[in-house]
Image: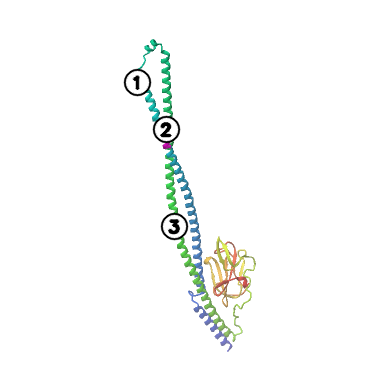
Amino acid sequence: MKRLTKIISAIIVMMIIISLSLTVSAENSSTYYQNKQNEANQNSQETQEKIDNVESQIDSVLQEVADLNVSILDYQNQIQQLTEKGKQLDQSISEKEKELAEKKKILENRLVAMYMKKPTTFLDVLLSGNLMNFISNKDLIKQIADYDNKLIAEVDELKTSLENEKEEVEKVKKEKEEKNKELENLKAEKEEKAANLTEEQKQLEKQLSEYKAKAEEYAELERQAIAKEEAARKAAEEQRRKAASSNSNSAPVTTYKGGKLGWPCPSSSRITSQYGYRILFGVRDFHTGIDIGAGTGSNIVAAESGTVILANYGWNGGYGNYIIINHGNGITTRYAHASKLYVTAGQTVSKGEVIAAVGTTGNSTGPHLHFEVRLNGSHTNPLNYL
């Protein structure tokens, strides 16, 4: 009779296990939705990094546009000054041309007057006794002519110098105008780039909103899946309890009943990052657990007895290699960034049992254990349970 009872109990437990496996299908399990949530969170993080990069590019381009505006204004001022200088040179050249014309006219008039005057022959001068007067008059006329010619040459030379200066001014002005046009074109290109980057930023922000909405949706589905798993597990435990009432060798049921969880990293008690908001990689985010600094390979132990519902290697939304243990009554714990995992999904573990080794996988800046406590799928401060 006792043998028959044991067989019946074993069959009941087996049926319960099979029933539990069927109740939570792969596509509806908390593990499935957690992976989906991690994927959405990872996409959100990558998209946020892209947005930050685009914002940085926009700031850089807008600064370049501002610098170009200053340069363009400076060139326009220089062009205006050169234009004014050109006008002044035109006026000076005009005045010198007028002065040159007047001096040439005076010289011409003098030469005409000398030509029209009746000439005195050398013999007349000798006979009249006016030789000295003749020599004096001749020297005086020569001196006047030389002086006039000198003034005309000076005016002509000054006019030529002014024209050369104006030519140089026009050359520089043309260069400034070409450079200014070049800067205007460059400014237009920068403004177009800023507009394109702004449009890209809008698209990325829209994408980010979609990823965050997906993450929230999967988080809710995960909570619902955990609730279903917990209900199925409680039913199974109740059936096992009933079956165990007639079998003294039945295994004890593991269910979290409150009290303090065990410290998950025996080799270290150093908390390097608390639960709550923090700045990481220049971005403010919410830290959903605590970080315990420890050497690579240090033991990670189960904070409470329970069933492993996830043991994954990979990036996993930044968690890296990590484990989730269900302790019953909606309580789950998470152990992230591990270098090695020593347990698998579906395995039952005891409080204090070694389940993994400390590492720095996933989104991590150094070896440590990221430890979370979740109640019905929602993260909560682990220090309230430790």
User: Position of 245 compared to 176: left or right?
Assistant: right
Q: Residues within 10 Å of mark 2 (few under 14, many from 20)?
A: many
The residues bearing labels 1 and 3 have C-alpha atoms spaced at a distance of 83 Å
Residue 263 at x, y percent in the picture: 63, 70
Between label 1 and label 3, give the one nearer the viewer. Answer: 1
Residue 314 at x, y percent in the picture: 52, 66
Q: Is residue 262 magenta?
A: no
What residue do we see at 46% from left, 65% from top? 207
Q: In front here: 31 or 162?
A: 162
**Quarter-wise, where is residue 156 in the image?**
top left
Q: Residues within 10 Å of mark 3 (few under 14, many from 20)?
A: few
Q: Secondary structure at mark 2?
A: helix
Counting the numbered discs, the total is 3
What residue do we see at 46% from left, 62% from top? 202
In the picture of the structure, the residue carrying the numbered disc 2 is: 159
In the picture of the structure, the residue carrying the numbered disc 1 is: 116
Q: Earlier in the sequence, mark 1 or mark 3?
A: 1
Is residue 52 positioned above or below 145 on the image? below
**Quarter-wise, where is residue 167 in the image?**
top left
Is residue 8 positioned above or below 283 on the image? below
Q: Secondary structure at mark 1?
A: helix
Is residue 167 positioned above or below 13 on the image? above
Magenta-tinted stretch: 89-95
Q: Residues within 10 Å of mark 1 (few under 14, many from 20)?
A: few
The residues bearing labels 2 and 3 have C-alpha atoms spaced at a distance of 53 Å
Q: In front here: 303 or 131?
A: 131
The label on residue 195 is: 3
Q: Name the kind of residue labelled 3 in the image.
A: Ala
